[in-house]
């Protein structure tokens, strides 16, 4: 990762530490050690990957032995000999080789045929449904936004504790909360306090810091502004240091997605206390000549996540991290006239992590018992959310989702 | 008489921050000379102020209104160079009130442009006219799905939002009122401009908010605009946008009564009530709101006499949390502390850095410390600090913070104390650094 070493307060360590609480210093050594010291359970982390545009599920997890598959997809169907076989029914797209490795290590769970009743085929609306976990009406908060609201009730935000970090430029509704504002930090360089000439830099930083230490002006918002201002510069400094120290040698794909994952790994390995990260990979709206671009996207996805998992394993953080991919919908079963596919319904959800049992979850939807040419969903996406909320985060999914959903048996006993 | 106490010399600056986007040095002199009352009078009567310089500038810049980036820049130019700041500020209020986003469904910048012009033209007049124009506005019809609202197959989205967000406020209508209003709006569509599709309109009788009749959308608008709840809802929202975040009920009631007076529904009368109130001139509203990104960015450029609008300014504002023509939801922007988070505040700090440091071969249009410094006579660096504090934060900051800024200004390269006014190169560096620091102050985040 490209990094400017001239980062805020880097050159004024003494000044910085004077303002730090003991708690902050303790946690600098990594949340893991900090947690052990305080006897608290380790932080569980979710990394949410939004596949924007509607990922073609049938060409991701391929029902290769089903004769209906190639019959309905004569030009874009993946031939049985190319498929990375999981069992005698389904296999992975050949570009998901990194996922095959994870699958063999029981670190990949494939939840088949995930969707919701009365599916909406508009990108805009369907992604909103997945993000808010509310298919029936428009909701302003996201499912993870509500979770964050719940677990932070009244707790003040400070630099060391992030409610969530969005690594995309735009905050998705998933993370839209009522009481907490989730920061979007898409580029480290942008999240760096910049100053003027080297000659003057030190003095400028000292002035900023000492002004922000104490700002007794009796006006509304001043105290909050002062606190967030200090938190912001501290966090920026910390991120920069982590990135500078990071010795990641893992081969991330040379793409925005790869860089985003690497940034997240740097923060997690560095012990930043943050339970939720969000990022996205877009380009899945493959209406025409689908096979080649779709394959490339899947390759970016799987290689990125493969490298990410190795990176985390090196610091033993992989046990605490769960990755989930989702998309607004799958594609229609039959290909269209342009060697592509149109907006469909149910599709697989990938979960990756060392805490998983791994394997296939649920049955592949039928290719012949269709709903107007579309797959019928087997598992409601809110069951996946509920399983993660209850069994990964130890939260109350009913409170977050507003209803009770069946839980899936996904995680290893600890 | 209002207690104007400590900020009395800055009362006109306070007015220009709220009723506009701050002021350039020239505007500051002009309005200060007129005084508060005459300034307010001018702001409230934009149609009497010639805006030909702006129009000329917009014409020569030639914007493509089918391009979203151009549209955003066009609006920034208006905010920057208009001689009718309140007209523009009110337009921004209505954009947040009737929050329509180009992103997602509308996806047509030209329709967004047309909507924006409607909000500007009708913003200070009778509310019923504005509400009707918005209800017939193609971008709105697409945004809130009224194009899919057909007889027998109603889409209730617009009917719900017109009551919840545009007029009555939640709790002042029933689910049945929504159903009936939706029937009245059936057939209001916009294939290519507004079009009333008779075949899709439900001509039957409706009962709506205890009235009965063969209502259509125009009737619903008329009924809603005349309601006392609408007056109250708008009064509170206007006060929150222009004056203070937590108004007392009595204040809201006075502004609401200005709307109800002679059933005129006059928005201008409401604004006059707000700006001429004791509340507006009191400590309760002075520096008591968080600047929106538009106020922060445009106000800074005005104050620092930066006249070049970089093409990426709308993106900078978007990263600060205010993406023009793409509000985050139908509710618009929440304002207040929702503008401030670690990332958005860092964006403000770095905008401060960027604007204070910009150096180009041509100084034209960008910050020029030499020129800024020559506009007042400084005998010392502390004079200089006071000048910029006065210009940027009305000198409204803790004594200790001022002292630290003076210390900073006096600190030479090697840590040796500067005496008098330093050499041009050092002066340039110090002025830039000083402006950067002042813009990061908590005080500077306040409107």
Image (tube, helix red, strand yellow):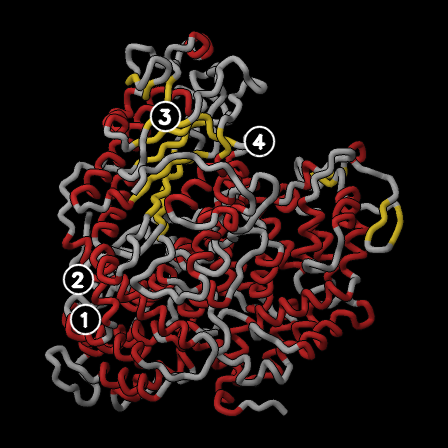
Give the secondary structure at mark 4.
loop
Q: Which label lies toward us, 4 or 2?
A: 4
The answer to whether residue A51 is visible is no
Relative placement, left or right, of A115 versus B311 is right
**Badge 4 is on which residue?**
A117
**Badge 1 is on which residue?**
A201
| Sequence-first disc among 4 and 2 | 2
The answer to whether residue B22 is visible is yes
x, y percentage for residue B92? 56, 61
Give the secondary structure at mark 2.
loop
**Badge 2 is on which residue?**
A6
Relative placement, left or right, of A49 versus B82 is left
Residue closer to the observer: A93 or B338 = A93
* Outermost residue, left side: B414
Q: Identify the residue at horizontal 28%, vertical 46% (top origin).
A: A320
Crowding around mark 4 (Cα neighbors within 10 Å: few <14, some 14 to 19, many 20+) is: few
Whether labels 3 and 4 share one chain: yes
**Badge 3 is on which residue?**
A360
| Cα separation between marks 3 and 1 | 56 Å
Q: Which chain does tag 4 point to? A: A
Circles 1, 2 touching at the beta carbon (< 8 Å):
yes
Circles 3, 2 touching at the beta carbon (< 8 Å):
no
Q: Identify the residue at horizontal 66%, vertical 35% (top origin).
A: B191
| Sequence-first disc among 4 and 1 | 4
Give the secondary structure at mark 1.
helix
| Sequence-first disc among 3 and 2 | 2
| Sequence-first disc among 3 and 1 | 1
| Sequence-first disc among 3 and 4 | 4
Circles 3, 1 touching at the beta carbon (< 8 Å):
no
């Amino acid at each position: 990762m490209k990094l400017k070493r001239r980062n805020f307060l880097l050159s004024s360590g003494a000044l910085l530490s004077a303002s730090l609480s003991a708690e902050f210093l303790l946690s600098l050594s990594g949340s893991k050690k900090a947690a052990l010291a305080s006897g608290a359970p380790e932080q569980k982390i979710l990394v949410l990957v939004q596949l924007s545009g509607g990922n073609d599920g049938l060409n991701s997890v391929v029902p290769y032995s089903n004769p209906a598959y190639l019959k309905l997809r004569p030009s874009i169907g993946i031939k049985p000999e190319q498929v990375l076989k999981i069992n005698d029914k389904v296999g992975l797209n050949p570009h998901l080789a990194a996922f095959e490795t994870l699958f063999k290590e029981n670190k990949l769970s494939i939840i088949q045929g995930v969707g919701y009743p009365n599916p909406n085929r508009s990108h805009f609306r369907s992604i909103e449904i997945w993000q808010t976990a509310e298919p029936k009406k428009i909701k302003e908060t996201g499912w993870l936004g509500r979770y964050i609201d719940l677990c932070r009730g009244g707790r003040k935000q400070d630099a060391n504790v992030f409610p969530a970090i969005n690594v995309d430029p735009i905050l998705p509704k998933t993370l839209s909360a009522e009481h907490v504002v989730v920061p979007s930090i898409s580029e480290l360089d942008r999240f760096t306090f910049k100053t003027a000439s080297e000659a003057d830099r030190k003095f400028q930083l000292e002035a900023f810091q000492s002004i922000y230490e104490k700002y007794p002006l009796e006006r509304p918002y001043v105290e909050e502004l002062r606190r967030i201002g200090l938190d912001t510069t501290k966090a920026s400094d910390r991120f920069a240091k982590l990135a500078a120290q990071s010795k990641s040698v893992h081969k991330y794909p040379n793409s925005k997605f790869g860089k985003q994952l690497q940034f997240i790994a740097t923060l997690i390995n560095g012990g930043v206390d943050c339970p939720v990260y969000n990022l996205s990979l877009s380009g899945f709206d493959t209406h025409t000549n689908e096979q080649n671009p779709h394959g490339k996207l899947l390759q970016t996805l799987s290689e990125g996540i493969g490298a990410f998992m190795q990176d985390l394993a090196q610091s033993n953080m992989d046990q605490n991290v769960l990755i989930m991919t989702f998309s607004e919908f799958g594609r229609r079963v039959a290909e269209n006239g342009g060697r592509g596919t149109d907006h469909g319904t149910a599709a697989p959800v990938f979960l990756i992590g060392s805490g998983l049992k791994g394997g296939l979850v649920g049955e592949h939807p039928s290719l012949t018992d269709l709903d107007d040419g579309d797959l019928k969903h087997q598992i409601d996406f809110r069951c996946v959310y509920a399983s993660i909320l209850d069994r990964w985060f130890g939260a109350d999914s009913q409170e977050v989702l507003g209803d009770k959903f069946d839980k899936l048996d996904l995680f290893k006993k600890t | 008489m209002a207690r104007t106490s400590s900020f009395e010399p800055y009362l006109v600056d306070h007015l220009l921050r709220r009723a506009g986007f701050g002021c350039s040095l020239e505007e500051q002199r002009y309005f200060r000379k007129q005084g508060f009352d005459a300034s307010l009078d001018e702001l409230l009567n934009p149609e009497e102020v010639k805006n030909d310089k702006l129009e000329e500038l917009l014409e020569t810049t030639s914007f493509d209104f089918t391009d979203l980036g151009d549209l955003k820049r066009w609006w920034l130019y208006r905010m920057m160079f208009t001689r009718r700041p309140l007209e523009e500020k009110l337009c921004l209020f209505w954009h947040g009130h009737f929050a329509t986003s180009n992103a997602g469904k509308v996806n047509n910048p030209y329709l967004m442009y047309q909507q924006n012009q409607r909000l500007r033209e009708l913003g200070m007049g009778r509310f019923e006219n504005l509400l009707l124009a918005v209800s017939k506005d193609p971008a709105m019809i697409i945004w809130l799905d009224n194009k899919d609202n057909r007889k027998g197959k109603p889409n209730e989205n617009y009917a719900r939002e017109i009551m919840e967000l545009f007029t009555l406020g939640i709790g002042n209508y029933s689910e049945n009122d929504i159903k009936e209003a939706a029937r009245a709006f059936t057939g209001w569509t916009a294939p290519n401009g507004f079009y009333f599709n008779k075949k899709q309109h439900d001509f039957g009788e409706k009962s709506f908010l205890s009235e009965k009749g063969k209502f259509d959308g125009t009737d619903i608008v008329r009924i809603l605009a005349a309601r006392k709840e609408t007056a109250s809802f708008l009064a509170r929202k206007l006060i929150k946008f222009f004056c203070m975040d937590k108004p007392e009920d009595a204040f809201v009631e006075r502004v609401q009564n200005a709307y109800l007076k002679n059933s005129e529904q006059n928005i201008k009368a409401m604004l006059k009530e707000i700006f001429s109130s004791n509340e507006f001139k009191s400590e309760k509203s002075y520096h008591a709101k968080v600047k929106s990104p538009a106020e922060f960015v445009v106000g800074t450029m005005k104050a620092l006499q930066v006249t070049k609008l970089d093409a990426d300014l709308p993106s900078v504002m978007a990263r600060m949390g205010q993406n023009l023509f793409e509000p985050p939801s139908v509710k618009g922007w929440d304002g207040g502390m929702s503008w401030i988070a670690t990332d958005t505040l860092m964006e403000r700090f770095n905008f401060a850095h960027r604007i204070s440091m910009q150096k180009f071969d041509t100084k034209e249009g960008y910050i020029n410390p030499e020129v800024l410094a020559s506009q007042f006579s400084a005998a010392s660096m502390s004079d200089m600090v006071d000048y910029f504090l006065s210009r940027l934060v009305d000198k409204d900051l803790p004594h200790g913070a001022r002292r630290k800024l003076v210390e900073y200004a006096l600190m030479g390269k090697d840590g040796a104390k500067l005496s008098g006014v330093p050499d041009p190169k050092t002066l340039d560096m110090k002025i830039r650094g000083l402006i950067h620091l002042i813009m990061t102050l908590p005080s500077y985040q306040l409107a």
